[in-house]
Amino acid sequence: MYIIIGLGNPGDKYQATRHNIGWDAITRISDDYRIPLDFKKHKAICGKGYIEGEKVILAKPMTYMNLSGESVRELVDFYKVSPEEIIVIYDDISLEVGQLRIRKKGSAGGHNGIKSIIQHIGTQDFPRIKIGVGDKPKDWDLADYVLGRFPKEEQATVRDALKDTSDACRMIITSGIDAAMNQYNKKKEETKKEDTKKVELKKRDIKNDRDKNDKERNKDIGIEDKKPTGHKSHIEKIKEIFKSAKNEDNNNI
């Protein structure tokens, strides 16, 4: 059994805010696997179901973020699971919007919800999925930023991140956390580098094709490619042919 916990704050004014992205992830998992969040217990909104044949409990603590550990402790005690069998999902301002970071364990890193969980269950050795919400602008108050909503231009990225989070939970359950870390911990910068490399390779392939086509055209018009004397462009070689032909015409006059 696994307990998947998404951190957030109860109340309409907190819905869809950066700090509630853990709650949004639970909603996404609930939708993906048709696990209704239909009962309140252990200071949380909960749902029971299965993911790939493994029993799971979905939970949104209702204690407010800073007291999340109270709910998590009740869940762990009631269902008698080890810390390794819980997955905590929450926001991280140190990651780019939409970037995931999966960890087997770790400190709170300044996150009050995680700090509360560590205090109540007595260990920091539990899996977690961090979802990047981006760093706050310089002049912003941190609370105002995390309790604010994503701008329109980031919403598609956030939706993709929630889908990835749902898929990552499935992979943790079916294949283990190491497999999920290998799959989802790739930084956006690494992805950008790979994309840049692909573009450069494509440019190189295009250049090779162009050079090959130039050689074929040169053969068709009787020009030999003699690189030792200096590689000349297709146009330069054509100019040489016309110049040679003109000189022959002048000699014949």
Image (tube, rainbow, N blue to C red):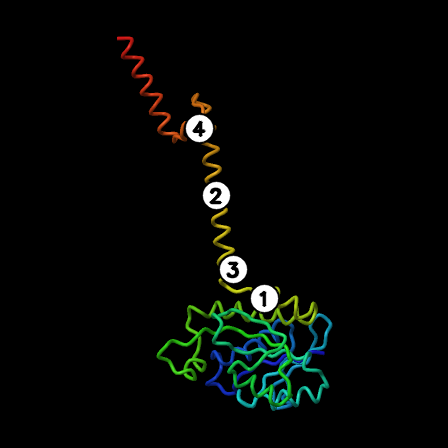
Circle 4/circle 3 CB separation < 8 Å:
no
Residue plotted at (64% across, 80% down): 125
Cα gap from disc 1 to disc 2, whole angstroms:
30 Å
Q: Quadrant of the C terminus?
A: top left
Pointers 3 and 1 in contact (C-beta within 8 Å): no
| Residue 121 pos. (x, y %) | 64, 88
Residue 165 sits in which quadrant?
Answer: bottom right
Q: Are marks 1 and 4 in contact (CB under 8 Å)?
A: no
Q: Is residue 178 left or right of residue 24?
A: right
Q: Real-space Cα distance between discs 1 and 4?
A: 51 Å
- Please name the residue that numbered disc 2 is placed on: 204
**Relative height, residue 141 to residue 209 (above, below):** below
First in sequence: mark 2 or mark 3?
3
- C-alpha span from label 2 to label 3: 20 Å
Task: Label 4, secondary structure: give it.
Answer: helix
Q: CA distance from mark 4 to mark 3?
A: 41 Å
Q: Which residue is mark 1?
A: 184
Residue at the outermost top position: 253
Answer few, some or many: residues within 10 Å of disc 3's Cα (few below 14, many 20 plus, some between 14 and 19): few
Instruction: List the residue tagged with mark 4.
Output: 228
